[in-house]
Image (cartoon, coloured by chain):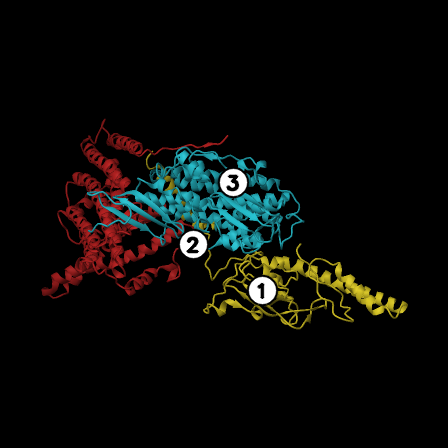
Chain colours: A red, B cyan, C yellow
Amino acid sequence: MTTAASVDQVFVTLKHWLVFHTPTAFQTLVSILLTIIPIIVIFPALFAVTTVLERKGLGRIQNRYGPNRVGPFGFFQPLADAVKSLTKEDIVPRAADHVVHYLAPLVLVGAAFLAYAVLPIGRNMVAVNLDAGVLFFFAIGAATELAVFMAGWSSRNKYSLLGAMRAIAQMISYEIPLILSSVAVIMIAGTLSTSHIVENQARYTAGIAHWYAFTPWGLAGFVLYMIAATAETNRSPFDLPEGESEIIAGYFIEYSGFKFALFFLAEYLEMFAVSGLGITLFLGGWSSPVSFLTWIPSWIWFFAKLLIMILGFIWIRGTLPRLRMDQLMNFAWKFMLPMSLIVIFTAGVWRFLPHVIAGSAAVGLVVRWLVCALLVIGPYVLLARTLERGRRIEKRTYRYAE
Amino acid sequence: MSERVLDLDPVGAGDTEILEVSMGPHHPSTHGVFRMDVRLEGEKVVRLKPVFGYLHRNHEKIAEHGAYLAAIPYTDRLDYLCSMTNNWGYCLAVEKLAGISVPERAEYIRVIVSELTRFQNHAGLIGFLLQDMGASGTPLMYAFREREKILDLFESLSGARMMCNYMRFGGVRVDCTPAWLDEVRSMLAGLPKFVDEFEALLRGNEILMARTQGVGVLPRELAINAGITGPMLRASGVNYDIRKVDHYGIYDRFEFRVPLGDHGDVYDRYMMRVLEMRESIKILEQALRDIPAGPIMDPKVRLRGLRPKAGEAYGRIESPKGELGFFLISDGSTIPYRYRVRPPSMINLTILEDMCLGQNVADVVITLGSVDIVLGEVDR
Amino acid sequence: MLGEGIIQGLVETARNFFGSYVDKDRLTTVQYPEERQPLPEAARVFPFLLYDGDDPVAGLRCVACQICEKECPPRCIHIDKSKDKKPDFVGKQQFYPAVFNIDVSVCMSCQICVEVCPFDAIRMDNAFELSTTDRFGGLLYTKRELAKSNEYYQQIHPTEAAECDERRAKELADAKAKAAAAAAAAKAAQAANPAAAPESATQASKNGAAAPAPSANGSATGAKGEPAKSETKVGQ
């Protein structure tokens, strides 16, 4: 193997070597552990780094330094936060349902971790190579909603129940555009297996990869997917269930100490997982966008893309105010749902338009791009206009006295 | 879940569950220690009772026990973000009562610091409004960046950033140097760009527009009947700016326009303040251009032992929040017989329930933010 | 179009983010306590008492007239007058404060005590890192803690101190000139009329005292007989 390929497969070879050198009775166990432990170590470490990045990023956007006292440039801040959350008193309301109250954060974190099982982090580096990987991912997503409701219900607090119901309404409404945008990809790829979807995108024509995001329907689908993902994970501007300090502090109002930290861990892990799936479906997973950069190892590509998406989340958080509940639901049902159906339709049109028109593949590409782009932009403008009219938003001008 | 039994108004049988929430004094979004007892039916507000008084500090009684001069530092602390305009209101009332005149240069300085105060108050308020909407503090930090520049100017002029204690009966306490005026000019040069940046961040933002347009509507007649003043009144379309009506100070020498809104909702109030910030910049430019040399205090006025003749006077100014008025009754001694403050924030607050009925509870916080209250003034 | 305002907002935020690394105006915080921003000259925190020279007792300017105590809005100053007197900077005998306490937990830094003091004895300090663990005693500043030298005043408020020193130097020179004139007049009067000399001398010195600059309590040192009482001029 060439050096680039061997660097690319270094973890896979390491794992095979370690499994090879253990006694046969323990080989399955060691193999499973060697797959799970890196996930359990890396992604929470990424969570720690993300909390610092977020605070420093928001700080710089707001013309101030972020935390910079603990460690070099403040990068040991998560250690301080961990010590703080571990040493706080764990208060459980007397009327609460103790078993469910205890289990809720655990179920949430567990479900978030399970979602990583089907993400291909590098070439040949997927934890469980399921044929129905995408289906498994969305099924686990439903389990997170269950955990949110468990948290809200068990606290025996009117306000947390209301917060939990709002959170669930939001998450369920946004599941649909999320799934429908990925249906377009599944349709084109013809498979539910995440590693096959990535392999389909890892082919190159004229040096450019076959990423689905490089097609008009893929780009629209990617944008829809990311908006729905932001809503799924309760990030700003959709953080009404957790950020609404008006009457309800959300479904985790009755949690303190380490359980509170577990909720945040789960939120960020979900964020990574759903971004990871977005990368897999639309941005070619671990493949490089241009063929002359394929020497960079695949896992580096995956994490680089993940980092860029995290920075995007932080950027949006620093800029936008929150949406109100009814506006949120309006947006999901009246805008995102029709748009995702349009995306599916456009994906089909893209597939079945002839690839070679007037004897040239380039002309064919241009024509297909134009047709599909129009098919996406037209309904976008129409839907946007109806949305604005429905809400009576207008640009106003002001007059002066005299 | 158990239904709450309401103690006051009986609820019809078979009604949907009514939730009574106290958005209590400890609250991140109520601009101070202020409580609202809100009764919700589902998501809609059916009753809202504002409860204030948590910051009552006996300001009027204290002022009635000391000399006229001793009340000036206490007026700083009424609307603690705008100490200069509070001082001016009180000095205006005493000057009317005692018949004291103010020299030219002092009038110009008063206008300059008051318009700077108006600018920093509106900038801070818009930042807070956006913070309440969940924009995680970014616009607030930008607004505070500019506000700090203005407060630094106040510190080099009067010695303190916010509790300036700067105006005296018959003028101002300390003269401003030409160096200070140059600093104001150079800071002023950067302000229009900031207002543009600020406006661009959020003017076309669809989320902001959706959350503020049509929310917290205050009809014109109701505003006039309830005694609302300030940007809230002008957002409902009433042309009433005390600077134009009373021409106090030397405001009749400056050219500036009064913006008016048509809908009276939160978006209009937000835009009123942005437009007023631009008008303040215009007034500042004119004042800095025209300020004459001269004395800053009326030489006949004694600092200690001011003893106005018996009588009464009401001095009012257009503070950034509305009409700030001081009513003084003198009985001929060195201590005022009656000292009364007309607090614009409190009077604007009385209409909160009417603006919030029928809306979502999330909109209550935004509507409260647009009223622009400072609890120091509401409770005195 | 939908989304346009959002894109504008995102551009604005990105500009601030990248600008914070390059443009000083976009990163406006300083790392206190390692870096401190310089205070402007006029900054005021709490009052302090001034003394001339090196001795905080003998050089203390305060004559316990208690005007600041009366005018202080929250009444945070407490003064006990002494029973005896000591000479001031022009040599006149004045009372001094036996007890001078300021309760800084009450003081609201309004600066009215500074404005009404006729003797340039109390000024505003600008030290603000004053936290203490004793909530009551630690926040009651006595005369010993409040007395700071004129050199310190010149350091923190140079322009004001220069103006104040100039004025006091002029008063001192005026007072010396008056004393010299009164002594010369006394000698001349004594030479002319030996009997009437003492009264006219004191009369001349009293007249010399009645006319001065507002904040001076100046009468000549002459003081051959009884010490002249200090006159305080009210208001300005």
Between B12 and C30, the one nearer to me in the picture: B12
Q: Secondary structure at mark 2?
A: loop
Q: Amino acid at mark 2?
A: Leu
Give the alpha-carbon distance from disc 1 to disc 3, as whole Å: 39 Å
Circle 3 packing at 10 Å, graded few (<14), some (14-19), many (20+), is many
Is residue A8 placed above or below B244 in the rendered structure?
below
Q: Position of residue A96 (x, y in %)?
A: 20, 58
In contact (CB < 8 Å): disc 2 and disc 1: no
> Label 3 belongs to which residue?
B280
Quarter where residue A374 is shown = top left
Q: Amino acid at mark 3?
A: Ser
**How far apart are the alpha carbons under marks 2 and 1?**
31 Å
Image label count: 3
> Of marks 2 and 3, which one's residue comes earlier in the chain?
2
Which mark lies nearer to you, 1 or 3?
Answer: 1
* Residue occupied by mark 1: C48
Q: Nearer the viewer, residue B289 or C170?
A: C170
Residue A201 visible to an observer of this rendering? no
Which residue shows up at 54% across the image and 43% down it? B314
Crowding at dot 2, Cα within 10 Å, few <14 / some 14-19 / many 20+, comes out as some
**Residue bearing the label numbered 2:** B55
Residue flagged by tag 1: what amino acid is it?
Answer: Phe
Asked if badge 2 and badge 1 are on a common chain, one would say no
